[in-house]
Every structure is written in structure tokens, then in C-alpha cells.
Image: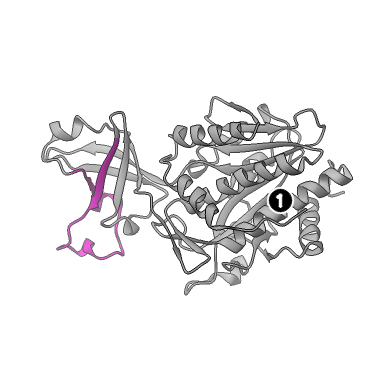
Amino acid sequence: MIKWIFEDKHFGKISELVNVVSPSMEERNMALYLRNEWLKNGAEVKSDVMGNVYATMNNDDTIHIGLIAHMDTTCIQITKILSNGLLQFRSIGLRPHLLLGQNMKILSSKGIIQGAIGFDPTSQYGQPKGLVDDDLWLDIGSSNYEETSSKVEIGDLAVLTPQISKIGDEVIYGTGIDDRAGLFILNECLKLFKETAPSVCLHCIGTTQEEVGLRGAGVIAAQCKLDVCFVVDVDFATDTLTPHENQMGALYLGKGVGMHIKSDNNPVLRKLVCDVAEKNNIPYQKSLGRFVYGGTDATAIQLQGGGVATLNINIPCRYMHSPVEFCHQKDIESAINIIMYSIQEIADKRINKFNPL
């Protein structure tokens, strides 16, 4: 198998994903985007009542491998329209002090409405620390309740206006890298699976509502029975001025994906994947992760049915849940190669048992 290499054209595909507006609880735009991409590659595509979207290839095989990334992003939700036309909101995964002055896109029944986060620069709350949602508002440029309510409704969701760029040759930064990086990896793995045709069944799954409690992942077992599931998501990089290596272990940009020792990573599958990586000179990092109990879709999937052998493929990410999430092309390469070489290993040796005993 030839190793996958990040090329200039791939930045364009990540940019496409970043520019799809799909906040938690309203992921339909991304589901439609993925559906079209997957149909181009000859996959069988379906969805479920939670809005998850599935692409299946080689469904007749007896070994079923899942490859999962979540479609939703952090966002805010409109809670009140004021008489002066301003909007109050609650945050869904976005810290208030990171929202000051940010451009936002509201997903409304009238289409996408542009706005910005306002605040009082003359008060103590003009300082980043100590902010709460009630100190901020969303401004769409209107001057009264009637004008605003003709465009926006209570409950509408808004995301940071999508942006993506590069620093140097290999570092990518912008909004929604969590988990557009994971979705990009799914798409590339699906293409490679079609080309290499390993003797297993592959299910690529875009999940909903990960940021509000791993809710979409909770129904996957009812749709497809998985022997193995790779969950591709970002995790906190520790190579900044606020490291937590004493609790989380080291996870640096550009050094390969993280292979964490924690509760939602099956130890047998983890050893298999690490052995494959070492045998094929694919970089990865041994680490721990922030939460020993999990925290990604793997946590929900692992306990379904009779149990699923799950493994997180962790992309190091600086400044998660902010307007400037950083990731590295080398880590995307690491993820795709580790996944595809591991799938080939499972196919060649017909491995479908991951019981630690």
C-alpha cells in the first residue's frame, strides 16, 4: 500500500467542509454535502432519525469496520429578541470571552443571516476575563424588535463565520477544525478503500449532536453492527504555554495522531494499530487524553449491543472551541495512513475478536 500524502488540493477540500454551516442540532447541510461526496465514490448511503449519515462499501463481508467523525460544530442559540433589535443567546460549547467582536452566521428559516457579537467596551466586561453570556449580545444591524423578528426566531442557531487559512506550509487554522479535519479524513479513507478494496465492510458515518452529549452516536448500533470502530476527532494539543502534560501526557502538532490509554480505547485494538504504525513507520504519539472516561463518540458507541472495539484517532488541536483552531497536515497524513494500514491488517488476518482475555 502506498502511503497517503497531503497535497495542495486537499486544503481545498478541507476548506469546503469548513464552509458548510452545521451547528449542533442542525447538521443537515453537512449531511447533504457528505451524501453527495460518498455517492460519487459508489457507496450505499442512508440516514437515520437522528440525522446521522452512513456510507457503506462491501456490505457482504462478515467483518464490519466503522469510521466515524461528527458533523456538528459549537455554536450559540438565540434565547430572546430585545425591543432594540439586539439578540440574547446561550453558548453551546463556545466560551463567552472568545466571542467578543466575532462575526457570526445565523441559520434561520429565512436563510443565513450575518451578525456580530456585541458588548459594552466601557464596562469592566470589556475585559476578556469574567464574561458570561448575559454580558454579550448578537447584533444583526437592526434597530427594533419587529425588524429582527422578521429575520430571526427564538431557538435559531448561529456559528462563528467560517474561515480557514494556513500558517507556513503545513499548519492549518480556522473555525470548525473540530471536526472538519475528521470528516476530511473519512472522505479520503473512503476513496482509498474503493481503490484498494480490502476484504472487509466499511461504514463511514457522520454523526450529529456530538457537542451536546454524543447523542447521534447513541443509535448507531441499531443501524449497523460493528466489530471495530475508529472515531476520528481532535484532542487538546499540549505544546502551548498552558500545557497539561502532568495530567494528559504529551500531544504535539506535527508529531502524529494520539493513541491514548483511556477507557473508551479497546486495548487489543490499540496494540494492533500501534504495531501496524511502527511496522510501517507511521508517526503517532502515546498519550493519555484529558478525560480518562472518554468524551468522544467512542464513549457512546463502545457500550452498544454486546460492546464494540473502539479506538480514538486523535488529531492534535490547539485552541479547541475557539475561532482559531490549529491542526497540522502531518497529523492528517498520520491518521489516514494508520487507519488504512490497520484496515488492511484486519482484512488480511480476518481479525474480528478484540476481547482482552
Residue 221: image location, x then y, percent: 68, 31
Q: Classify mark 1: helix, strand or loop.
A: helix
Which three-letter amino acid code belongs to the residue tagged 1? Ile
Magenta-drawn segment:
112-140
User: Is 138 covered by the magenta stretch?
Assistant: yes
Visible residue check, residue 142? yes
Local packing at callout 1 (Cα closer than 10 Å; few below 14, some 14-19, many 20+) is: many
The residue at 31%/55% (across/down) is 99
Which residue is the site of mark 1? 339
In the foreground, 169 or 266? 169
In the foreground, 67 or 99? 67
In the foreground, 7 or 160? 7
Q: Residue furthest bottom?
A: 241
Horizontal relation, residue 340 to residue 36: left or right:
right
The residue at 51%/54% (across/down) is 11
The residue at 29%/58% (across/down) is 131
Horizontal relation, residue 36 to residue 101: left or right:
right
